[in-house]
Amino acid sequence: VLRVQAAPILAEGVQPGVLVTLRDISHVEEAEQQRRDFVANVSHEMRSPLTVLAGFIETLKGPAREDPVATANFLDIMEREAQRMTRLVSDLLSLSRVEGEERVRPRDRVSMSEVLRATLAALRPQFEDAGVRVDFTDLPDVPPIAGDRDQLVQVFRNLVENALKYGGSGGRVEVGMRLIEQMPGFTGPVIKVDVRDFGDGIDAIHLPRLTERFYRVDGHRSRAMGGTGLGLAIVKHIVNRHRGRFAIRSTRGEGSTFSVTLPLG
Ligand code: ADP
């Protein structure tokens, strides 16, 4: 996109003419477009639960007034929709915070082993309810990394929850950590954490877009699972802040592996 500006040159003693300037504003346009898309997406995501809530309030005030069974049922649905809004707002706040902090180096000394153990312990009840096994390969003696503990817990909570939600049909999720001395793109040793599921997998065409805000392979399924479409966008920003790398591999029918590589020290 080019912005063209023309200005007459009419000064005394100078040959009259026109000064034309061309400026490439593609990047500005692109950023503007992304901002507009984002606002449209947020509005859309907010509107559907609000529409449901408004509809059920009307019904409860009118036809369902004297019907305790219907009332209880509608209140359950309204509660779920309110929870969906709460999750959306809380993910939007997280995203805005991690985007804002992306250039601030995290300085706490964080044990990745502890981060993973805490994450898995918190999710254990969900795995038990779903009858899905988690195999964790711990590396307890690995040195700490410079990081933000709560953000790293958020990364692995998102990945492990996704493995359960979308890959749980495989019956098993593997979480493994490895210390790698040398890896292209890094100057020193790294810790690589893989979260692997054995579910349906993801078609290759979706992979590059999964970390975009609100991108979902199957919007209906994601919403039914309580997803906001923001989890992997949050993961990407947190990993960037830690100067790490985030990679997704998947094979249709076999499952997916989400890898986070973080520099040590
Ligand atoms: P959501 O809130 O929808 O789960 P995410 O940003 O966490 O949003 O993930 C984006 C999309 O990526 C999901 O909607 C789902 O389609 C896909 N996805 C994420 N993890 C997996 C997985 N382990 N297996 C298959 N698809 C996945």
Image (cartoon, helix red, strand yellow):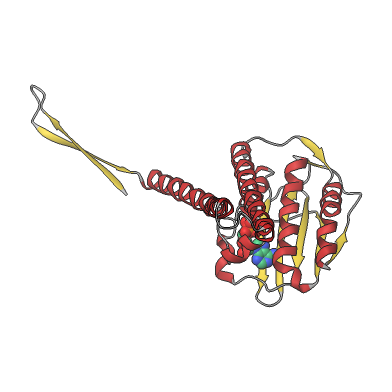
Please name whichever residue, 49 or 133, is drawn nearer the observer in this view of the structure: 49
Q: Is residue 209 above or below residue 102?
A: below
Q: Quadrant of the C terminus?
A: top right
Residue at horizontal 56 percent and vertical 66 percent from the top: 206
Camera sees residue 198? no
Q: Is residue 258 above or below residue 57?
A: below
As drawn, the residue found furthest toward the top would be: 12
Q: Give residue 14's quadrant in the image.
A: top left
Counting from the top left corner in percent of width and height, residue 11 is at 11, 24
Residue 198 falls left or right of residue 202: right
Counting from the top left corner in percent of width and height, residue 2 is at 29, 47
Counting from the top left corner in percent of width and height, residue 23 is at 30, 42
As drawn, the residue found furthest toward the right would be: 141
Please name whichever residue, 108 or 121, is drawn nearer the observer in this view of the structure: 121
Residue 247 falls left or right of residue 198: left
- How many numbered markers are drawn? 0
Residue at horizontal 63 percent and vertical 56 percent from the top: 66
Residue 214 falls left or right of residue 157: left
Camera sees residue 170? yes
Ligand 1, seen in the image, is in the quarter at: bottom right
Please name whichever residue, 206 or 50, is drawn nearer the observer in this view of the structure: 50
Residue at horizontal 83 percent and vertical 63 percent from the top: 129
As drawn, the residue found furthest toward the front would be: 66
Counting from the top left corner in percent of width and height, residue 232 is at 64, 54
